[in-house]
Amino acid sequence: MDKKEIATKEDLIKVINLLDSLKMRYWIEGGWGVDILLGKENRDHRDIDVDFDAEFTGILLDALKRKGFEIKTDWSPSRIELYHPKLGYLDIHPLLINEDGSARQADTQGGWFELEAKWFSTALFEGRVIPCISAEAQMLFHSGYDLRDVDRIDMKNLRLAVLESKAELED
């Protein structure tokens, strides 16, 4: 049987509804995070990337397993990739959130990525406010390595949106 290789907008909304029901802090990042910032779907997405409060790791994994997700890759405490036959791939990233709103994510080498509080944002998408990673952080996270074609498209769209936003502010 073929695996579902595209996470649709409808899949995204179902995942967001599940996350909201758990009353936990989370932010969408990656390709869907970019499209949320842009306010519309701009391309197909293989997965949904979610940063979340690491204190909810057990609760989130239990909820996802009850929903039918199964773990495909476990690089705890850095990331866990899950798969659902109807909802596709979900890549979750536990964050240790500090009192000042900044956070740390474990890297796969035993170190830490430091995330600034200002990088945790929201944007209006499909008529609702969705927690997501800021444009500044998305652009930073997409630097220092060879980008895939989809990443180049995301960064081009994001840069154009940032430029348009700055131009509107100057008017």
Image (cartoon, rainbow, N blue to C red):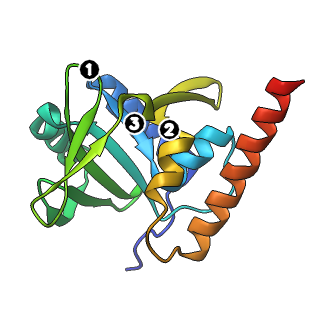
* Mark 2 vs mark 3, CA separation in Å: 13 Å
Pointer 2: what residue? 13
| Residue wearing tag 3 | 27
Disc 2/disc 1 C-alpha distance (Å): 29 Å
The percent position of residue 46, horizontal first and vertical second, equals 48, 65
Residue position for label 1: 100
Tell me what residue is drawn at x 76 percent, y 34 percent. 165
Residue 55 at what x, y percent from top left?
A: 12, 31
Asked if disc 2 and disc 1 are in contact, CB closer than 8 Å, the reply is no
Determine the secondary structure under disc 1.
loop
- Disc 3 marks a residue whose amino acid type is Trp
Q: Residue extending furthest front?
A: 170
Where does residue 24 sit, x and y in percent of width and height?
26, 25
Measured as percent of width and height from the top left, residue 126 is found at 64, 32
- Mark earlier in primary sequence (3, 1): 3
Q: Which amino acid, mark 1?
A: Asp
Q: Which corner quadrant holds the C terminus?
A: top right
Q: Horizontally, is 158 left or right of 13 in the view? A: right
Question: Who's the residue at 43% across and 42% down the image?
Answer: 28
Say above or below: 33 vs 100: below
Q: Would residue 141 appear left or right of 136 to someone viewing this image? A: left
Choose between 66 and 92: the one closer to the eye.
Answer: 92
Circle 2 Cα neighbour tier, 10 Å, few/some/many (<14 / 14–19 / ≥20): some
At 29% from the left and 24% from the top, the residue drawn is: 101
Closer to the camera in the image, 51 or 83:
51
Q: Amino acid at mark 2?
A: Ile
Give me the C-alpha separation between circle 3 and circle 1: 17 Å
